[in-house]
Amino acid sequence: MIWRQDFVRSHLERDVPMFVPRMPAELVGRLWRMLAHAQGTPVNNARIAASLEVSSPAIGR
C-alpha cells in the first residue's frame, strides 16, 4: 500500500504537470479520488468543480 501511494504521488508531482500545468498536484490527486468514488455514474463537472473550488472548465480540461 505504501509503495502504491508513493507511486501515485510521484506520478502526480512529476508526470501530470506536463499535461495539466495550471493545476497543483494535490488538486489533481483529489480529483482522481473523487472520480474513483463516482465510477459507474455520470460525471457532473459542476458538482466536482464546486467540491474542489475550481471552475467547471478546469475540470473538463
Image (spheres, grey):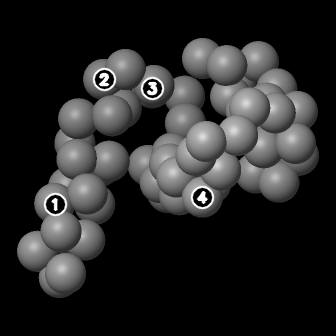
The residue where tag 3 is placed is 21
Label whose residue precedes the other's in the sequence (1 or 2) = 1
Pointers 4 and 2 in contact (CB under 8 A)? no
3D distance between C-alphas at marks 1 and 3: 20 Å
Residue visible at 55% across and 36% down?
23
Judge whether residue 27 can be spotted in this image. Answer: no
Find numbered disc 4 in the image and state the secondary structure of the residue it sits on.
helix
Residue at image position (73%, 32%) is 43
Mark 4 or 2 closer to N-term?
2
Residue found farthest to the front = 40
Mark toward the viewer: 4 or 2: 4
Give the Cα distance between marks 4 and 3.
24 Å
Q: Position of residue 25 (x, y in %)?
A: 44, 49
Q: Position of residue 58 (x, y in %)?
A: 70, 24
The three-letter amino acid code for the residue at tag 3 is Pro
* Nearest to the observer: residue 16 or residue 44: 44
Residue occupying the point 87% across, 42% down: 47
- The image position of residue 14, as x and y in percent, is 22, 42
SS category of the residue bearing label 3: loop
Residue named by callout 4 = 37
Q: Amino acid at mark 4?
A: His
Residue identifier under label 2: 18
Q: Which residue is mark 1?
A: 7
Q: Sequence-wise, which precedes: disc 1 or disc 3?
A: 1
Dot 1 falls on a residue whose secondary structure is helix
Disc 1 crowd rating (10 Å Cα; few below 14, some 14-19, many 20+) is few
* In this view, 57 is above or below 27: above
